[in-house]
Image (cartoon, rainbow, N blue to C red):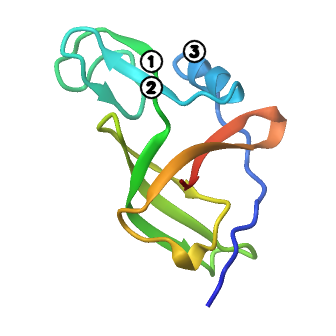
Amino acid sequence: MTTPSTDRPLAAPQVDAATEHFWASAKQGLLVTRVCTACGKPHWYPRALCPFCLGETEWRALSGRGTIYSVSVTRRAGPIPYAIAYVALEEGITMLTNIVDCDLDSLRIGQPVEAVFKPADGGAMVPMFRPA
């Protein structure tokens, strides 16, 4: 069976002072997160204090490369099937995201993926992943 991914309408993200840099970077095609300046650990989702040691954090670019940790193709939630997945990034963090630009039936755990940005309402770009 073949189920091609199809772009679907995306709601505009809720942007606030804590996420403004993330969304501005995404609009430029960059995937970023915060990294602790004390212990050096990156974390997802981005927040001002490190969840591991409560140290200060700073924004850093990510490679955008990773592997599928878990994936599920949703066919009945709406008219357009889509894949939701946890992606383990090279930097050691895991993101809940969508897998796009592929045959949804060919997705497998451990499959290499790369970041891609899809437009949302209002002009924002939303990071997702596609097979590498």
* Residue 43 figure quarter: top left
Q: Which mark is residue 17?
A: 3
Which of disc 2 and disc 3 is earlier in sequence? 3
* Residue 93 figure quarter: top left
Question: How much space separates mark 1 and mark 2, taking CA atoms?
Answer: 6 Å
Marks 1/3 in contact by CB < 8 Å: the verdict is no
Looking at the image, the residue that sits furthest to the right is: 122
Classify 10 Å Cα crowding around label 2: few (below 14), some (14-19), many (20 and above).
Answer: many
Q: Give the side of residue 115 with respect to residue 71, left or right.
A: right
Q: Which mark is residue 60?
A: 1
Q: Which residue is mark 2?
A: 33
At label 2, the amino acid type is: Thr
Q: Give the side of residue 132 with respect to residue 53, left or right.
A: right
Q: Is residue 11 above or below residue 25?
A: below
User: Residue 127 in the image: x percent, y percent?
Assistant: 60, 41
Q: Which mark is residue 1?
A: none
Q: Residue at x 75, y 76 (%)?
A: 79
Marks 1/2 in contact by CB < 8 Å: the verdict is yes
Q: Which of the two marks, 1 or 3, is nearer to us in this view?
A: 1
Q: Give the side of residue 75 with respect to residue 52, left or right.
A: right
Classify 10 Å Cα crowding around label 1: few (below 14), some (14-19), many (20 and above).
Answer: some
At label 1, the amino acid type is: Arg
Task: Assign the N terminus to one quadrant of the image.
Answer: bottom right
User: Residue 132 in the image: x percent, y percent?
Assistant: 54, 53
Q: Is residue 21 above or below residue 56?
A: below
Which of disc 2 and disc 1 is earlier in sequence? 2
